[in-house]
Image (cartoon, rainbow, N blue to C red):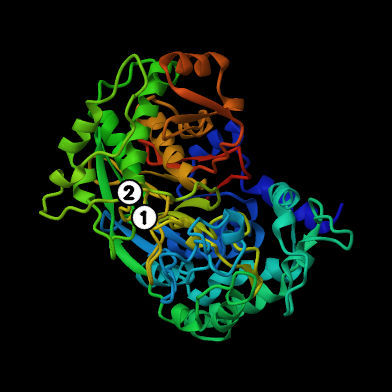
Amino acid sequence: MNRNVFVYLFVLLSVSACSSDKVAVEEKKSQAMVVTANPLATAAGLEILRAGGSAVDAAIAIEAVLSLVEPQSSGLAGGGFMVHFDASENEISVYDGRETAPAAATADMFLLDDNTPMAYLNAKNSGLSTGAPGVLAMLSLAHKDQGILEWKNLFKRAEQLATDGFNISPRLYGMLDNYGKYIPKTPEEGPIDAYEYFFDENGQPYPVGHVLKNPEYVKTLKIVAEDVSAFYKGPIAAAIAEMVQREPRAGRLTAADIASYQAVKHKALCQPYKKVQVCGPPPPSSWLAVGMILGIIENSYGFSDLGAADPKNWALFAQAQQLAYADRDQYVADNRQIDVPLKGLLNPDYLAKRAATLTTDKALLNITAGDPWQYNGTTTTQISGIDATQDVHGTTHFVIVDAQGDVVSMTATVESIFGTTRMVGGMFLNNQLTDFSFQHTDKQGLPIANAVAPNKKPRSSMSPSIVLDDKGQFLMATGSPGGNNIIAYTAKTLVGVFDWGLSPQEAVDLPNMVARGDVVRMEKDASSDSLIKALQDFGLNVDASRGENSGLSVILRKPDGTLEGAADKRREGVIGSL
């Protein structure tokens, strides 16, 4: 057996697979835990915790490894959101590393000469779609607040894996096999080409277990480890800008745009639910839709005691999603530039009004945005056009609890699969700007909130969440990748645990349901035929889809203080504990 294949399998077994037996053993002793989408990333996080590092320290090491071993999902040239719980202060903070549009961005940037939207893949696989990267600035800001170990020591595992090589995992191979055709075959100028990196001389993706080495990423890591500002103001930024500005479909991001990027620390949004507080990031994250789903459910006629076994409970969950998604799509955008009725959308009276439209015996007839402005506590109102943002999947999520009880719930992304497919410094560049609406007005000429604008952040569906108990102490952390579906995936897990009495793993394993608009997508392979039929009989337009590929990760603090983890079997999720 190839030594690296052996190492990969050893790591996979060592950090605990998702079997219920292993989880049960870990529950009895775990005081620190990591759940990520890749065994090598989980091992990197555990290594930092074992050395006395904080949850933020571990997050940095994890993301540096994920950028290498899960490049289809996230990377250091991408962005993200981190929700952090400080156990010593019982305080939740949000670190915002969402990318920004260049100063030269325009509202019609993704429109053709005839004013129709550019084809999505043409926009994605271009320089136009890359925003100023934010994840490293975000991690640096969080480290200044919450780091214990030296910054430079947090990149060593990623550097070792990039130097010695890592094995292509089954998921990475599957992505290359299915989507590698979009990676340009013409080598770009420079020392590393994405196509040559992943494909053999016959044009076939390297197989599972093949050892990939990434010397360009090693160089990037060495620069970043010494001084993160060198990423934003040195040769890496210049190289990113140069690559972005290449044809076809040259972009507008400049080195000056990258140099001016600033991560931001926010106060978390929190939604009371039963006896807990569920918290997440403010806009441009769409987390408030998760809060709205919970608030609508709590103000509704409620779930029956049968939990997940009752199709009517699923119908209620679907209707709550439909209303929350309608409001999210209409109103949520970068609130530095757009007035977002935050207080109104989460106002209990508004949520009760939305809940009053839910039915017990038939599907909603009118799935449209409500009017939260009158509940916003201000005189400001803004009429927004019908959203035209496209639905795409991507991203990664992980959760960490350290020995001090501090917690990180973090979602990171390069947006769609392999970002723009352009590589610099051993990293894929993000295509985050395709998270904007390509059209800036709707058919009535009304302005769309999530339209492109200079220095604006595109709306994000990333919804990392932390739950506090009635004493303000940490109870659970969760989140998922999945594009617009993140909201539904995350809400499902929260409902499963806090309403339906399931364990974290049982909640993660529930069928995924995404009810955005009038179509309700159900995960066919996880749903019973009787559930699908019952929802159809209720009047819901059910699409039994095999594509609901969540990547949920969960850590729950049990009443005795020990930790219980859950990792999504739909990806390569792995639990590790100390």
Label 2 residue SS: loop
Q: Is residue 23 above or below residue 535?
A: below
Residue that appears at 43% across and 76% down: 104
Q: Which mark is residue 444?
A: 2
Q: In the rendered view, does 525 fall on the left or right side of 261?
A: right
Q: In the rendered view, does 172 fall on the left or right side of 444?
A: right
Residue ranking furthest to the front = 114
Query: Picture coordinates of residue 298 (x, y %)?
Result: 25, 29
Q: Quadrant of residue 303?
A: top left
Residue that appears at 52% across and 19% down: 532
Q: How crowded is mark 2: few (under 14 residues within 10 Å), some or many (20 or more)?
A: few
Query: Picture coordinates of residue 252 (x, y %)?
Result: 51, 75
Q: Quadrant of residue 215?
A: bottom right
Residue that appears at 54% across and 27% down: 543
Instruction: Please state which of residues 3 and 132 is positioned toward the viewer in this rendering.
Output: 132
Q: In this view, does 130 lie above or below 74?
A: below
Residue labelled with disc 1: 441
Q: In this view, does 22 lie above or below 46?
A: above
Label 1 residue SS: loop
Tell which tag, 2 or 1, sits nearer the viewer: 2
Query: Picture coordinates of residue 520 (x, y %)?
Result: 47, 29
Q: Which mark is residue 240?
A: none
